Amino acid sequence: MKILFVGFGNLGAQVFDLFVLRAKRGDQFLVGGRNLDYIRERTRWTAGAALQLGILAQADVTYMDVWNIDQTAQTIAEFKPDVIFSSMTTLASSIVAQLPHPYAETLAQARGGPWLPTTLVLVHKLMQAVQQTGLTITVLNGGTPDNSHEVLSKVGLAPTSGIGNIALTIPPLKRAIAEQLHLSVDLIEVHFFAHTYVVQSLRSGTTGEAPFHLTALAGGADITAQIDLPAIFRVLPLTMEHEYTQLLTAASAAAVLDVITAKSSVIVHAPGPIGLPGGYSIQRQRTGIEVALPPGFTLHEMIQINQEGQRFDGIDTIDDSGTVYFSERNMAILKDILHYECQRMPLSEVEDRAKELQAKYADFRKTVE
Ligand SMILES: NC(=O)c1ccc[n+]([C@@H]2O[C@H](COP(=O)([O-])OP(=O)(O)OC[C@H]3O[C@@H](n4cnc5c(N)ncnc54)[C@H](OP(=O)(O)O)[C@@H]3O)[C@@H](O)[C@H]2O)c1
């Protein structure tokens, strides 16, 4: 298999580590990015670790700046990857937490929605480059898949699936359910449907009042009615590790890749699969991945749950042309602190909005340093 990595920051590098350490003979990796010295050094560490384990991984690096769609398309066309793993952003997600009190706490209340341009702009460019090659490529994306994939689906450019987010809740949920019912964790299966707004809220032990759906099974039998779900959610802050390494997210990427490449028929969880908003349980079907619905529930219901979560995250709606309408309440926080405001964003304006948001954040940063 040939895998191209685009966006080799904290998340991309950790996913690369895991994919290389699981590589099969003949697998080829190419890492594209702008800081070639760093990427060369970082990929050498991984190749060295692989060699310790007797894995001879072929990993090359190449200059890639996705703002340049033609150059990106050319690199993709030459390498012909089966899979692209993308995790790019123009502003790291940690920038809000790095701000001094009380700005960090106040801006955090705006949630992820208003910041959408900072990731959407790059995955939009990447998907345009993929389209330009005419190749059929599986694209897995880590950068705000809950919100950006629905936008891109409106113009036929949705990546195959997101990774992480909802998937990060599954091991702690399974452990908590098993513990509450005194069952072995390997008997427990869950179908969880929730936007990343809910996922982030669960780090504090609630769903933040947004809707979700959870069906739990033990050995195939429905045990949902036996669970005290609020009690389960209350213990999650203890077990939903706030990871710094991104190893948990990387494991989710590997699990989704296994399902897509038919190595696994199990149910996994992913945000933004097949251009949908929010998070779902998914499974491989004959024609690719599909949402794995629990009996008695429809895809329409699960999409509605996720769209409601998306509103809490700061995005009111996404219309059929891909124009994003931001929630006034969330945007008011960015307007107040950063003097950035955008109520309506046609996809054609995402580049300008991403640059404006980056500039306004940089200006604000200077005033608090
Ligand atoms: N789904 C999940 O569960 C999950 C978990 C963790 C993170 N994330 C998301 O994943 C994204 C990446 O997070 P991170 O922590 O890895 O951020 P990060 O460390 O800041 O990495 C971002 C990467 O994007 C690259 N990039 C930016 N502009 C580019 C361009 N024009 N062409 C090519 N590469 C470009 C950067 O390269 P340069 O050095 O050249 O700028 C950098 O390598 C964020 O959106 C974050 O919120 C998602």
Image (cartoon, rainbow, N blue to C red):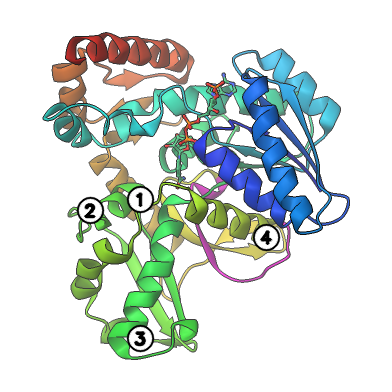
Q: Are marks 1 and 4 in contact (CB under 8 Å)?
A: no
Q: Is residue 97 left or right of residue 277?
A: left
Q: Does any portion of residue 340 appear in the rendered image?
A: no
Residue 290, compared with residue 7, is above or below; it is below
On the image, numbered disc 1 is attached to which residue? 195
Quick one: label 4, few (<14), some, or many (20+) residues within 10 Å? Answer: some
Give whichever of discs 3 and 4 has the lower sequence position. Answer: 3
Mark carried by residue 159: none
Query: Where is residue 80, by image quadrant?
Result: top right
Residue 314's x, y, as percent? 26, 35
Q: Secondary structure at mark 2?
A: loop
Please name the residue that numbered disc 2 is placed on.
210
Residue 6 counted in the magenta span = no
- Measure how far apart labels 2 and 1 are at the Cα level: 9 Å
Residue at the image position 46 percent from the left and 58 percent from the top: 167
**Residue 13 location (% of width, % of height):** 59, 39
135, 255: nearer the viewer = 255
Which residue occupies 37% across, 27% down? 324
Looking at the image, residue 278 sits to the left or right of residue 31; the answer is left
Q: Position of residue 355 (x, y in %)?
A: 41, 11
Question: Start and end of the magenta stretch?
Answer: 261-274
Near-viewer residue (199 or 39): 39
The vertical placement of 365 against 187, above or below, is: above
Which mark, by number, is residue 223? 3
Q: Amino acid at mark 4?
A: Asp
Q: Which residue is mark 4?
A: 258
Locate the C terminus and report the quarter of the image it occupies: top left
User: How far apart are labels 1 and 4 at the CA level?
Assistant: 23 Å
